[in-house]
Amino acid sequence: MGRAPCCDKASVKRGPWSPEEDEQLRSYVQRHGIGGNWIALPQKAGLNRCGKSCRLRWLNYLRPDIKHGGYTEQEDRIIWSLYSSIGSRWSIIASKLPGRTDNDVKNYWNTKLKKKAMAAAAAVGRAGGGGNASAAFAVAAPATPPALSPASSSVTSSSGDVRFGGAVYATDPQPQAGQGLIRFGTTSAPRTDHQLAPVPAAAAQLVDGAVWRTSSTSDAAISVAQLADDDVFLAELGGGGEQLLPYYGDFFGGLQPQDRAALELSACYFPNMMTEMWGAAASDAKPQQGLCDTLT
DNA sequence: AAGTATCGCAACCGCACGTCA
DNA sequence: ATGACGTGCGGTTGCGATACT
C-alpha cells in the first residue's frame, strides 16, 4: 500500500501564488506562528493550498529575513567550497549563508555558479592541467616523502554535476608562506555539523613534514595572516579555526597552475564524498590503495 | 517586429527521516 | 517493534522574462 498523499491535489490550488495568498499566509504566520503543523495550517489560514506548498512558500519567499539575488563573491566562495566538500547538501550550505534558502542556493549553483566553475576549470586545463575539467585540480607529485600517487580530483557524478576536490599532496614549486592549504588544530572535537574531523597526529606530522603547515607554527600564522579575509571563510564556518580547515585556492580569481595544490586533504575526511569521487574516477587517477587510511 | 532559444527562478514531486502513539 | 504522520531535503519541471536571430 502506498503512502497517502499529504493533501488532495485535485482540490487544492497549485502553481504560482497570488499577492493575496501571500498576504494571507504572511499575516497568519505573523499572528499565530507556524504552530508546528504545516498540514493543518492552510485550513486555519483559509488558504486552499497544500501544507507543503505553504511551507515552501513561507520558507523560500515570504520569510522576513530572505535575501534574493545579489550574491557576493564571498558567498560564491562559501558555496563553492562547501559544495566541493559535501556535495549538494543545499540545506547545510544555505545554513551558512544568512538570508539564503536551500532552494535559492541550489538554483544559483545550477544556473550560474556551476558554469562559472566549469569555465574556470576548463581554463586551468588549457593552462596545462590536461585539457578537461577533471584535470583542473590534478595533483602534482609530492615534493617530499611519503611517495603518494598523483590523484585526479574531479569527477562527474551520476547526476552530471562536476565535483571538485580530492587529495593534493604537493605543489611545484613548494608553497610559500601565504599559500596555506590546510590549518590543523590539535585539540578540538570533531565538528559533526560540517563533517569535519580533527586531523590525526600522524597525518598532521606527515603533511607538515611535506608541504603544509600547522597552526602552531609561525608559518601558519604568516600564511593565515596573508590570506585575504574572504579566503579564510571556512575558519568562520568552522567556528573558531581549530578544526581542519580546507583552504581553497583563489578559484574565482583565476586559479594558476602552481596553485593547484590548494585542494584538499579534507577529502579523506569526507567519507561519502570519497566513495563517490574515487569510485567514479578513472582508474589511473585514483589514489593509491590505502591513501586515506594512511592519512586518517 | 516576430519568432525562437535560452535563462532564471518558483514551485512541485517523491523519497527519507524523525517522532510518536 | 511497527506503522502513521509530518517535515525536510534534493532533484526536476514549468513558465515567464530576456536575449538573440
Image: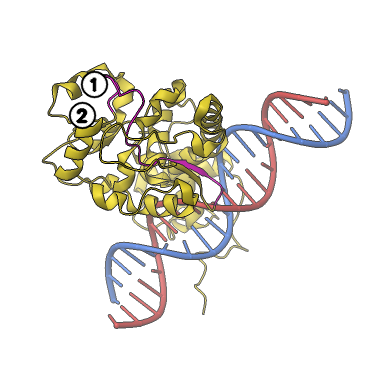
Chain colours: A yellow, B blue, C red
Q: Earlier in the sequence, mark 1 or mark 2?
A: 2
Please give the name of the residue rendered at 24% of the width and 47% of the height, measured from the top-left corner: A295
**Three-letter residue code for mark 1:** Ser
Cα–Cα gap, marks 1 and 2: 9 Å
Tag in front: 1 or 2: 2
**Three-letter residue code for mark 2:** Arg
Q: Local crowd at mark 2 within 10 Å, few (<14), some, or many (≥20)?
A: many
Q: Secondary structure at mark 2?
A: loop
Residue, disc 2: A213
The verdict on a common chain for dots 1 and 2 is yes
Marks 1,2: beta carbons within 8 A: yes
Q: Local crowd at mark 1 within 10 Å, few (<14), some, or many (≥20)?
A: many
Residue, disc 1: A223
* Magenta stretch bounds: A159-180
Q: Secondary structure at mark 1?
A: helix
Instruction: Name the spot of residue A16 as percent of width and height, x first.
Output: 60, 45
